[in-house]
Image (cartoon, rainbow, N blue to C red):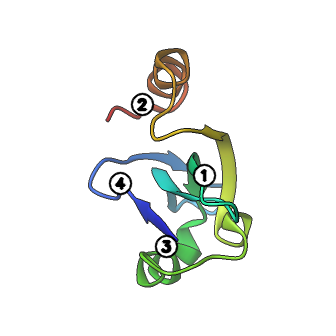
Amino acid sequence: MFSSSLRKQSHRPAENGKLNPVVLVRGHDMDGNSTWFYLMVDAGKLKAFKSNQGKELVSLTDYGRVLYSGFGKNPSDIIKWKMEKEYGFTE
């Protein structure tokens, strides 16, 4: 199960000129542990990604590139700072 912060996103230009949104995805692993991922969603897969919110995903990499990930409900302050500096993402 996952949810994502699509209201809070930044965009990075893709090679094809489209914008790739960067989102924070929260969920649980197979053992029920809380997890989080910063995902750069492929522009062409954003609609499918949005339609799968709240459903199980086999692999987030089917929708884009995982930039950072970890266990717990929230990323550390260091990761948040990196995301702001590298991708303009603020939560």
Amino acid beneath label 4: Ser
Q: Is residue 88 left or right of residue 12?
A: left
Viewer-nearest of discs 2 and 1: 1
- Residues at marks 1 and 3 touching, judged by CB atoms closer than 8 Å: no
Q: Mark 3 points at which residue?
A: 46
C-alpha distance separating marks 2 and 4: 14 Å
Q: Return the x and y of residue 90 as percentages of the image width and height.
A: 34, 32
Q: In terms of sequence position, does the residue under pointer 3 or pointer 2 come before the other?
A: 3
Q: Distance between the residues labelled 1 and 4?
A: 19 Å
Cα distance, mark 3 to mark 2?
19 Å
Left or right of 46? Residue 63 is right
Please state if 86 lies on the left or on the right of 21 as rendered.
right
- Is disc 2 surrounded by few (<14), some (14 to 19) or many (20+) residues within 10 Å? some
Per the image, the residue denoted by label 1 is 33
Q: Mark 4 points at which residue?
A: 5
In which image quadrant can residue 7 be found?
Answer: bottom left
For the point 66% across and 41% down, the residue is: 67
Front residue of this view, candidates 89 and 5: 5
Q: In this orientation, does residue 22 appear?
A: no
- Contact flag, marks 4 and 3 (Cβ < 8 Å): no
Residue 45, image x, y percentages? 57, 76
- Can you say whether 5 is above or below 69 in the image? below
Q: What residue type is labelled 1?
A: Asn
46, above or below 77, in the image: below
Name the mark nearer the viewer: 1 or 3: 1
| Amino acid at dot 2 | Gly
Q: Quadrant of residue 84?
A: top left
Which of labels 4 and 3 is toward the front? 4
Q: Residues within 10 Å of mark 3 (few under 14, many from 20)?
A: some
